[in-house]
Amino acid sequence: MHPGDVDPFYLKMPHVESGMTVGLFGGSFNPPHDGHVLVADIALRRLGLDQLWWMVTPGNPLKSRNHLAPLAERIALSEAIAGDPRIKVTAFEQSLGQSYTARTLEKIRKRNRDIRFVWIMGADNLQNFHQWQDWQKIAGTFPIAVIDRPGATLSYLSSKMAKTFDYARIDEDRAAALAFRKAPAWTFIHGPRSPLSSTALRAKS
Ligand SMILES: Nc1ncnc2c1ncn2[C@@H]1O[C@H](COP(=O)(O)OP(=O)(O)OP(=O)(O)O)[C@@H](O)[C@H]1O
Ligand SMILES: O=C(O)c1ccc[n+]([C@@H]2O[C@H](COP(=O)([O-])O)[C@@H](O)[C@H]2O)c1
């Protein structure tokens, strides 16, 4: 392995035991920060997850890659910050040769028929979710947990996704049952919020 190469360990889907509930937390993590850790903690606790896959994307299809740090660097920084042993940092999307969430989730489902998955994202992503490739298919693949973020708290009322799938929204008091619901099913989770962003951190460095 050359310096800068991604360790092959991270290019495989994480190991998971039959019957587990697993959160899928995709992100650029450019760089990772405590806001991400807060989202992971909230998801693990409120959704009652056994594992959370911290999926470092080769590149968000909607974002420019101009200021994107190398994948190996984003993985190493993610490992350094993700303290909980239930969190599995992974970059297996790289080995799929693409980074569209709809296709990734389809692969995950095909390989893990007896696992309950939940897609996890911050509330800012709810606002532009309808611009993601095959967004309605994503919502029909696994349940979705949207975690509150400063500046995006009202997105669960106004976004196209929230309006389209209003009938499939469950109350956050029942978040622990989300993984067991048939998709489409989603919830918006309020709680402690972090104002941190990778954009702000990049601007400081
Ligand atoms: N402070 C935060 N609160 C809630 N969710 C967050 C927060 N920061 C990031 N997220 C969520 O974590 C996931 C990964 O985010 P990402 O790596 O793009 O970080 P970011 O801070 O939003 O980056 P950037 O500023 O470069 O857009 C996304 O679903 C995003 O909505
Ligand atoms: O599939 C898409 O069209 C798509 C569009 C935007 C974002 N995503 C995914 O959403 C996750 C969050 O992205 P980001 O950049 O907000 O951290 C990450 O896994 C991206 O690959 C996916």
Image (cartoon, grey):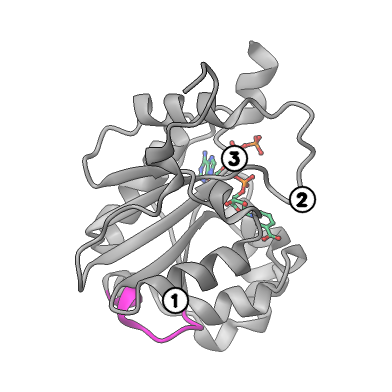
Q: Which residues are magenta?
A: 177-185
- One can see residue 147 in this view: yes
Amino acid on which the number 3 mark rests in the picture: Ser
Instruction: State the residue at coordinates (63%, 79%).
Output: 137
Query: Which comes sooner in the sequence, label 2 or label 3?
Result: 3
Total labels drawn: 3
CA separation in Å, label 2 and label 3 = 11 Å
Q: Residue furthest front?
A: 1
Residue that badge 3 annotates: 28
Residue that badge 1 annotates: 110
- One can see residue 149 in this view: no
Circle 3 residues within 10 Å: few <14, some 14–19, many ≥20: some
For mark 3, give the secondary structure.
loop
Q: Residue 62 bears which disc, if any? A: 2
**Is 179 included in the stretch rendered in magenta?**
yes
Q: Are marks 1 and 3 in contact (CB under 8 Å)?
A: no
Instruction: Answer left or right for 180 relative to 91.
Output: left
Instruction: State the residue at coordinates (64%, 24%).
Output: 200
Q: Are marks 2 and 3 in contact (CB under 8 Å)?
A: no
CA separation in Å, label 2 and label 1 = 25 Å
